[in-house]
Image (cartoon, helix red, strand yellow):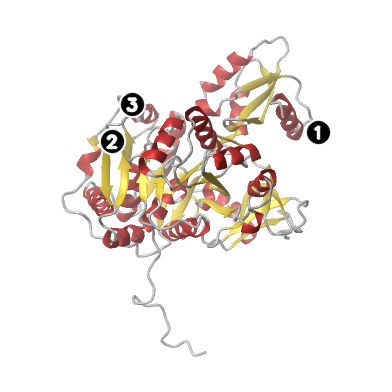
């Protein structure tokens, strides 16, 4: 075919960006409710104006193309605004985990070269501790929130409200859809955490696929139980904008807060780790609650047990299981439900839902391959390989780490490090985590980081950490410790020692003093310890 005159033009090609979702919804549905936070209510026209005022204000405060603007905050209106305003200003949004220790926060800010931090008033003290460890700290804008329970003192150069310009910025899409939109740091499986960079194209693609693969209807009422710092809230700020839904902000997550939101705001959708499911179940049992309307929940991390699915269905909540990583914008694999399974017993339905599933519609390929030969494993439900992903919902790479980026993308696929089988129907099922990641309450915890802290204890001669099943948190760290000759220690002392060195939530919940099983070459047999941990947990 003669291709002359068929090149890309302004009329037939526009860079993809999630910012266009907000622009369209504010224009088409300006008066629809967009945001709920306590007594605060805002329409999409009001959210759009705030975003454009903040973007203009960031520009006037010296934020330019490619600069990094960080946010350290719970799920509040400021976080919704930042998801759009920072990239609209041409900058890159760094979403900081509110559970990080000061040292790791300082590292993320210095490594990213953040120029400005938007910090919630309850976390300003934590940020102050991190700033004290930095050679030169960024500018800090304090976000005051009337719903904050315990504001803290700390360094602040200006108030968040003063960043808003009087004249809103005109909507400007990026010149290049490959431009960096945001930055998220991994939990640090080995050594320092890695900075995962997202593009405008990738975020827009994942946001659309969220709606497609969850069959999200127009005007959903979305409850923010999933932290927005997790992969930009799995890109759901953009999905909710695209569908002209309602962001129901939830500053402090609890069973009562979730169920109250169900009743008061007509919540239709929420995302969260297994701990959120447990909260809903326990709260419902205490209150005798049943949702007055259908609610759909998307969950990742540990597969939902049959009893959990059964209890949620009994109160009107339907569960969808997904899989992903920070490097793929959150979820990009879904346990797509086949209606022919509806009549199966709940135990069988739970088994099917527990499988990680198939690729998102807009993710090109998710496969299970031999990491040595790169050959795809048989679809027999038994042959184990590594989950590998390629497509538009994959990060640009790791910030300032070309070697790690090249390694992660070797052979034309992103290597997840997770080991799985593929069933005859094409669905993936994880069998192990080769990175020894522990997923507790939706947070990724590195066993290596905990082991490093344990080895700093003078009484510890050997240590290994594995995941222990936990009814509430899904998994918690369990430490197996060998004591040095002539040394003594107890469980409480070891846990306290570790908590002084890393974030509290990463510390082991259980410490077992016994010899570590090893191979003939001296390598710790973690598979044996995982089995031992399951036995200790009663499983």
Quadrant placement of the C terminus: top right
Q: Secondary structure at mark 2?
A: strand
Q: Earlier in the sequence, mark 2 or mark 3?
A: 2
Identify the residue shown where x is 23% and y is 53%.
49
Q: Is residue 312 shown above or below 390?
A: above
**Labels 1 and 2: the sequence-earlier one:** 2
Residue 221 pos. (x, y %): 39, 48
Instruction: Please rate how many residues cluster around mark 1, counting C-alpha atoms within 10 Å: few if below 14, some from 14 to 19, many from 20.
Output: few
Residue at the location (75% across, 57% down)?
A: 377
Specify few, some or many for label 2: CA neighbours under 10 Å numbering under 14, 14-19, or 20 or more.
many
Verify CB contact (< 8 Å) between mark 1 and mark 3. Answer: no
The residue that label 1 is drawn on is: 521
Q: Position of residue 384 (x, y in %)?
A: 75, 50
Position of residue 142 relative to residue 347, above or below, is above
- For marks 1 and 3, give the CA distance: 53 Å
Which residue bears the numbered disc 2?
Answer: 143
Which label number is shown at residue 149? 3
Q: Is residue 502 in view?
A: no
Q: Which element carries disc 3, helix, strand or loop?
A: loop
**461 sits left or right of 128 in the view:** right
Toward which corner of the image does residue 292 lie, by quadrant?
top left
Q: Position of residue 325 (x, y in %)?
A: 55, 47
Name the residue rendered at 44%, 88% in the picture. Answer: 4
């Amino acid at each position: 075919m003669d291709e002359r005159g068929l090149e890309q033009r302004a009329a037939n090609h526009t860079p993809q960006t999630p910012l266009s979702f907000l622009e369209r919804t504010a224009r088409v549905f300006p008066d629809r409710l967009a945001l709920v936070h306590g007594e605060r209510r805002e329409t999409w026209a009001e959210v759009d104006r705030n975003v454009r005022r903040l973007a203009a204000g960031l520009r006037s405060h010296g934020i330019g193309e490619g600069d990094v603007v960080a946010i350290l905050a719970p799920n509040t209106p400021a976080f919704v605004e930042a998801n759009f305003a920072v990239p609209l200003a041409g900058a890159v949004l760094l979403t900081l985990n509110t559970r990080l220790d000061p040292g790791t926060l300082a590292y993320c800010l210095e490594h990213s070269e953040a120029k400005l931090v938007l910090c919630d008033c309850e976390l300003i003290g934590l940020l102050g501790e991190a700033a004290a460890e930095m050679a030169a700290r960024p500018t800090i804008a304090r976000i005051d929130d009337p719903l904050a329970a315990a504001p803290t003192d700390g360094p602040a150069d200006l108030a968040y409200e003063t960043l808003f310009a009087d004249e809103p910025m005109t909507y400007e899409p990026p010149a290049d859809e490959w431009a960096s939109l945001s930055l998220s740091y991994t939990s640090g499986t080995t050594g320092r955490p890695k900075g995962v960079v997202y593009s405008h194209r990738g975020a827009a693609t994942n946001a659309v696929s969220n709606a497609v693969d969850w069959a999200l209807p127009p005007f959903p009422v979305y409850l923010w139980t999933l932290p927005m710092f997790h992969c930009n809230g799995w890109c759901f700020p953009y999905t909710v904008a695209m569908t002209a839904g309602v962001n129901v902000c939830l500053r402090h997550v609890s069973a009562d807060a979730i169920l109250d939101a169900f009743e008061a705001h007509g919540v239709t959708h929420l995302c969260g780790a297994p701990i959120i499911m447990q909260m809903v179940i326990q709260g419902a049992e205490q209150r005798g609650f049943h949702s007055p309307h259908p609610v759909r929940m998307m969950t990742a991390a540990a597969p939902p047990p049959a009893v959990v699915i059964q209890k949620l269905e009994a109160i009107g909540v339907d569960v969808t299981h997904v899989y992903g990583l920070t490097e793929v914008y959150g979820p990009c694999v879904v346990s797509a439900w086949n209606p022919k399974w509806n009549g199966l017993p709940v135990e069988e339905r739970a088994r099917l839902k527990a499988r990680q599933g198939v690729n998102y519609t807009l993710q090109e390929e998710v496969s299970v391959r031999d990491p040595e030969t790169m050959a795809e494993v048989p679809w027999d439900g038994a042959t184990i390989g590594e989950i590998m992903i390629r497509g538009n919902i994959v990060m640009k790479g790791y910030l300032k780490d070309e070697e790690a980026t090249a390694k992660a993308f070797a052979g034309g696929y992103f290597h997840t490090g997770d080991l799985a089988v593929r069933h005859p129907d094409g669905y993936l099922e994880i069998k192990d985590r080769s990175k020894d990641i522990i997923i507790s309450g939706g947070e990724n915890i590195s066993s290596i980081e905990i082991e490093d802290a344990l080895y700093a204890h003078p009484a510890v001669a050997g240590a290994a950490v594995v995941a222990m099943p936990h009814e509430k948190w899904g998994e918690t760290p369990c430490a197996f410790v060998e004591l040095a000759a002539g040394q003594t220690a107890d469980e409480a002392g070891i846990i306290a020692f570790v908590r002084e060195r890393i974030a509290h939530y990463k510390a082991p919940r259980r410490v077992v003093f016994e010899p570590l099983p090893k191979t003939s070459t001296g390598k710790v047999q973690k598979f044996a310890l995982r089995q031992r941990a399951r036995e200790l947990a009663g499983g």
